[in-house]
Image (tube, rainbow, N blue to C red):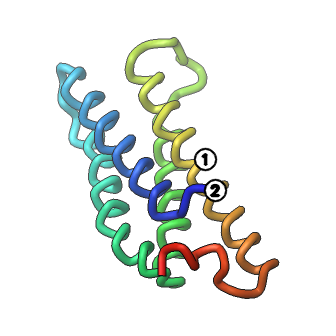
Amino acid sequence: MAHPYIINTVNALVLIILGLIGYFTNPAKPPVALLAPFFGFLLLACTYHLRKHNRFVFHTVTALTLLVAVLVFARINPSTFTWNMRNILLLLMGLSCFGAVAFYVFTFVRERRLGNDTIYKDDL
């Protein structure tokens, strides 16, 4: 099973890469398109503290990832939805964030049920 810091790194890289692709493929180059890469860099900066099992950072990263997922999905207009490059990138980024949040919550629940840090013993 992967650890939360690995999932966080993958999710952050997805946000950075797909966000930059979306920004540079859009001829208008709107500044709002750089929100996903910005949050990706913030999440990537938290990876070190996730590796050290800082619970405050765990919860902050989970909330921030959920916020990014909602922000990304909010940029999709359902009344004019078409399968173009912009919407596909937004869907991929949102699904990546929701998947990461689901994994984080699953990890919290599993750790709570065990009652000890055996999930992370191979890291320590």
Residue type at mark 2 is Phe
The single residue placed furthest to the right in the displayed view is 113
Above or below 80: residue 115: below
Q: Secondary structure at mark 2?
A: helix
The single residue placed furthest to the front in the displayed view is 122
Q: Which residue is mark 2?
A: 103
* Place of residue 3 in the rendered image (x, y in percent of width and height, measured from the top left): 54, 62
Q: Nearer the viewer, residue 89 or 58?
A: 58
The residue at 38%/77% (across/down) is 49
Q: Which residue is mark 1?
A: 99
Q: Nearer the viewer, residue 9 or 42?
A: 9
* Place of residue 90 in the rendered image (x, y in percent of width and height, measured from the top left): 45, 32
User: Distance from label 1 to label 2 (Cα)?
Assistant: 6 Å
Crowd tier of the residue under label 2, counting other residues whose Cα lies within 10 Å: few below 14, some 14–19, many 20 or above: some
Q: Are marks 1 and 2 in contact (CB under 8 Å)?
A: yes
The single residue placed furthest to the top in the displayed view is 83
Residue type at mark 1 is Gly
54 lies left or right of 41: right
Count the labels in the image: 2
* Place of residue 57 in the rendered image (x, y in percent of width and height, measured from the top left): 46, 78
Crowd tier of the residue under label 1, counting other residues whose Cα lies within 10 Å: few below 14, some 14–19, many 20 or above: some
The residue at 23%/21% (across/down) is 25
The residue at 54%/67% (across/down) is 63
The residue at 42%/73% (across/down) is 51
